[in-house]
Image: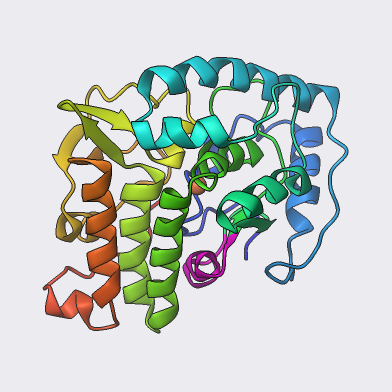
């Protein structure tokens, strides 16, 4: 697991950006805080206990700003499966929750728990932990100067995106299905293919409802600027071969999004692909070998 500030390695952990674009790059106090919280994850075993964070009033204020912006945006733009999950998700309005406050509700609904990440987690660990009901989440908060944008996953992304997802048994099962497939394969190429399926569905997927693409992915749900704004993007119907052949961008808005015809279509697409997935799937389907640097 990398906790480095300088470099943005390839990962399926969420939306990432380059350090030179980070709003906190010239803020030494912010960087120290962020890096100290990230460093806690070094060598941390999946599922092991870890301490909470004494969040500052500034961090709680950032949370409230994002909460106030996202709640109506979710109601306006999220798909039905997410709205159902939201009704059950216990997201506090007043400030940044501890992971330990979020996990018991997830465990009760779907068996999932948050486990500590420092930022970027290698595909094998990140995806593989999902089979066993662990989702890697960070503790640090985005820079307060730009509360509605983050170039890297932060605790707000993890809670407003994945925390909502993992309150729903149907959505949580998709995480497990991808995790199961990840644990079946050995090659980096196979994991890369799965990371693209993960990225274009669970992170940035859409689900059509009455012909309108509605927001599903965690990266969209947690990004006020992206949740309902798809102008200038290529929108394609979900096709797993196309997804598995499409490189994703980690440092800017996604130029291509894929919309399932329905939530059942999304479930079937991920389920069927992952059920048969192995190290030879890419070759069998004639998928291109894509460069590994997506920065
Ligand atoms: Fe994410």
The residue lying at 45 percent from left, 68 percent from top is 179
125 inside magenta stretch: yes
Inspect this view and state whether residue 97 appears: yes
Write down the quadrant of residue 150 in the picture.
top right
Residue in the image at 45% along x and 40% along y:
218
Viewer-side residue, 113 vs 278: 113
Q: 9 left or right of 48?
A: left
Residue at image x 26%, y 37%? 207
Is residue 255 at all visible to an observer of this figure? no
Return the residue nearer the eye: 87 or 45.
87
Q: Tell me if residue 128 comes above or below residue 280 in the rendering.
A: above
Could you say which quadrant of the image residue 22 lies in? top right
Residue 9 in picture, x, y percent from top left? 50, 59
Q: Is residue 156 rendered to the left or right of residue 17?
A: right
Residue stretch rendered in magenta on the structure: 121-134
From the viewer's side, name the closer residue of 35 and 234: 234
Q: Percent x, y for residue 261?
A: 17, 40
* Residue at x 24% of width, y 67% of height: 273
Q: Residue 15 in the image: state x and y as whole percent.
A: 47, 43
Residue 181: image location, x then y, percent: 37, 73
Q: Quadrant of residue 216?
A: top left
Looking at the image, residue 75 lies above or below residue 181: above
The magenta stretch spans residue 162: no
Asked whether, in this view, residue 86 is left or right of residue 106, the answer is: left
């Amino acid at each position: 697991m990398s906790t480095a500030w300088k470099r943005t390695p390839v990962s399926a952990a969420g939306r990432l950006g380059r350090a030179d674009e980070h709003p906190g790059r010239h803020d030494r106090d912010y960087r120290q805080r962020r890096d100290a919280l990230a460093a806690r994850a070094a060598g941390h075993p999946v599922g092991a206990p870890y301490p909470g964070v004494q969040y500052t009033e500034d961090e709680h204020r950032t949370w409230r700003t994002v909460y106030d912006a996202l709640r109506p945006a979710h109601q306006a733009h999220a798909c039905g499966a997410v709205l159902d999950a939201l009704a059950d998700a216990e997201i506090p309005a007043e400030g940044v929750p501890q992971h330990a406050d979020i996990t018991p509700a997830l465990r009760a609904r779907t068996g999932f728990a948050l486990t500590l990440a420092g930022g970027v987690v290698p595909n094998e660990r990140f995806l593989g932990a999902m089979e066993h009901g662990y989702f890697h989440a960070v503790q640090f908060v985005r820079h307060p100067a730009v509360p509605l944008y983050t170039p890297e996953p932060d605790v707000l992304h993890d809670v407003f995106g994945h925390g909502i997802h993992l309150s729903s048994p149907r959505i949580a099962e998709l995480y497990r299905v991808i995790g199961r497939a990840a644990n079946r394969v050995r090659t980096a190429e196979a994991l890369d293919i799965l990371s693209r399926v993960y990225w274009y569905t669970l992170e940035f997927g859409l689900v059509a409802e009455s012909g309108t693409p509605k927001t599903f992915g965690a990266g969209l749900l947690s990004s006020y600027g992206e949740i309902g704004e798809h102008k200038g993007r290529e929108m394609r119907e979900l096709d797993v071969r196309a997804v598995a052949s499409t490189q994703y961008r980690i440092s800017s808005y996604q130029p291509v999004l894929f919309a399932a015809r329905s939530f059942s279509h999304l479930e079937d697409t991920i389920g069927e692909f992952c059920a048969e997935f192995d190290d030879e799937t890419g070759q069998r389907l004639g998928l291109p070998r894509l460069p590994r640097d997506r920065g």
